């Protein structure tokens, strides 16, 4: 049954592509897990629960983390459902990681150093750093940006992880950067390579596993604290970051429905009013302003 693996993979891909289309990177990770699993099954009409158990034993013996195996558990469940194979496992069988590891944050001083070295970057590198150091974005959201998502006034961020689609006002210091670059969709791997090149050019040393996502922690923390310091609503940072309504309501309102009913646009006559408030307290935006050359003194003219 040589055709078995490819036929099974095609059914999984079809399942992931309709009726709700998953992001390309999501499809790739599901397919990679499915291929790895099917390569261990051998020549059979359909895999069994024993095949699944042996797969997870081998993955653990190979050093795979529980966090990775949790994802793969759901990848394989989708593979089985797509092919109408019995899936005998329950929630209690899901691999469980005792401690959820966060990616390291990027210290403010390092972000400042990255911005200060912008003259060394290509237009693309400057563009993605400007977005990541201004807006609270994920790597996947950076990878999705296309030229049609922005003009001279605003940019649309297509959020991942069930967040809300965001439209941001492009701050004045960033407009020349946006005008010089025509973005196209990239893979997340390509975005990681861009980040690595930026850090190398700026001579910024990173902690292991640091990336674009590391800026999210720094921006969220600093903007929230700045809003509180100025007696402004700290929930604006959640609106700015495109949090899901449920997360916003639970964290800032004590109930998920608070996020559902909360409409920050009521507070502003300008549709970009909340952006303008954030920009006033933003920790890094002023660093993108072009420094004007000092005026020559009468002494220097002589």
Image (cartoon, rainbow, N blue to C red):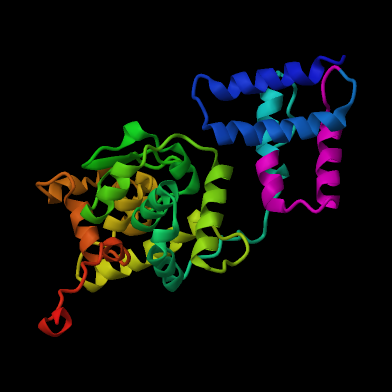
Q: Nearer the viewer, residue 161 or 180?
A: 180
Residue 244 within the segment the image draws in magenta? no
The reply, left or right, for residue 298 in relation to residue 142 is left
Q: Which residues are magenta?
A: 45-72
The reply, left or right, for residue 189 in relation to residue 65 is left
In the displayed structure, would residue 13 be above or below residue 242? above
- Name the spot of residue 156 as percent of width and height, x first: 31, 39
Residue at the image position 9 percent from the left and 47 percent from the top: 269
- Name the spot of residue 227 as percent of width and height, x first: 25, 66
In the displayed structure, would residue 215 be above or below residue 90? below
Residue 49 within the segment the image draws in magenta? yes
Q: Nearer the viewer, residue 239 or 112?
A: 112
Q: What is the quadrant of the N terminus in the image?
A: top right
Residue at the image position 17 percent from the left and 82 percent from the top: 300
Q: Nearer the viewer, residue 177 or 163?
A: 177
Residue at the image position 46 percent from the left and 34 percent from the top: 185
User: Number of callouts in the render?
Assistant: 0
Q: Where on the picture, by quarter, is residue 29?
A: top right
Q: Where on the picture, by quarter, is residue 236?
A: bottom left
Q: Nearer the viewer, residue 297 or 217?
A: 297
Residue at the image position 71 percent from the left and 46 percent from the top: 69
Q: Residue furthest front?
A: 302
Q: What is the quadrant of the C terminus in the image?
A: bottom left
In the displayed structure, would residue 278 be above or below residue 77? below
In the displayed structure, would residue 129 be above or below residue 300? above
Q: Residue furthest right?
A: 43
Most common secondary structure along the magenta stretch:
helix
- Name the spot of residue 270 as percent of width and height, x first: 12, 46
Q: Where on the picture, by quarter, is residue 261?
A: top left
């Amino acid at each position: 049954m040589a055709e078995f693996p490819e036929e099974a993979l095609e059914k999984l891909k079809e399942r992931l592509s309709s009726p709700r289309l998953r992001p390309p990177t999501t499809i790739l990770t599901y397919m990679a897990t499915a291929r790895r699993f099917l390569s261990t099954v051998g020549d059979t009409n359909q895999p069994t629960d024993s095949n699944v158990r042996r797969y997870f034993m081998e993955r653990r013996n190979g050093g795979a983390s529980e966090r990775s195996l949790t994802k793969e558990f759901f990848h394989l469940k989708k593979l089985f459902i797509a092919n109408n194979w019995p899936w005998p496992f329950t929630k209690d069988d899901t691999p469980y990681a005792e401690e959820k590891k966060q990616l390291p944050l990027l210290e403010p001083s390092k972000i400042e150093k990255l911005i200060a070295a912008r003259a060394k970057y290509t237009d693309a590198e400057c563009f993605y750093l400007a977005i990541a150091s201004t807006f609270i974005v994920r790597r996947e959201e950076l990878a999705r940006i296309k030229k049609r998502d922005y003009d001279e006034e605003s940019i649309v961020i297509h959020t991942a992880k069930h967040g809300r689609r965001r439209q941001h006002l492009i701050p004045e210091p960033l407009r020349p950067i946006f005008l010089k670059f025509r973005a196209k969709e990239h893979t997340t791997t390509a975005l990681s390579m861009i980040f690595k090149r930026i850090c190398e050019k700026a001579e910024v040393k990173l902690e292991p596993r640091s990336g674009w996502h590391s800026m999210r922690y720094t921006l969220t923390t600093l903007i929230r604290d700045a809003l509180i310091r100025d007696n402004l609503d700290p929930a604006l940072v959640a609106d700015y970051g495109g949090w899901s309504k449920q997360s916003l309501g639970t964290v800032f309102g004590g109930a998920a429905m608070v996020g559902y009913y909360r409409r920050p646009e009521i507070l502003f006559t300008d549709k970009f009013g909340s952006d303008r408030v954030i920009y006033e307290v933003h920790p890094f935006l002023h660093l993108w302003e072009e420094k004007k050359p000092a005026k020559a003194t009468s002494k220097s003219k002589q």
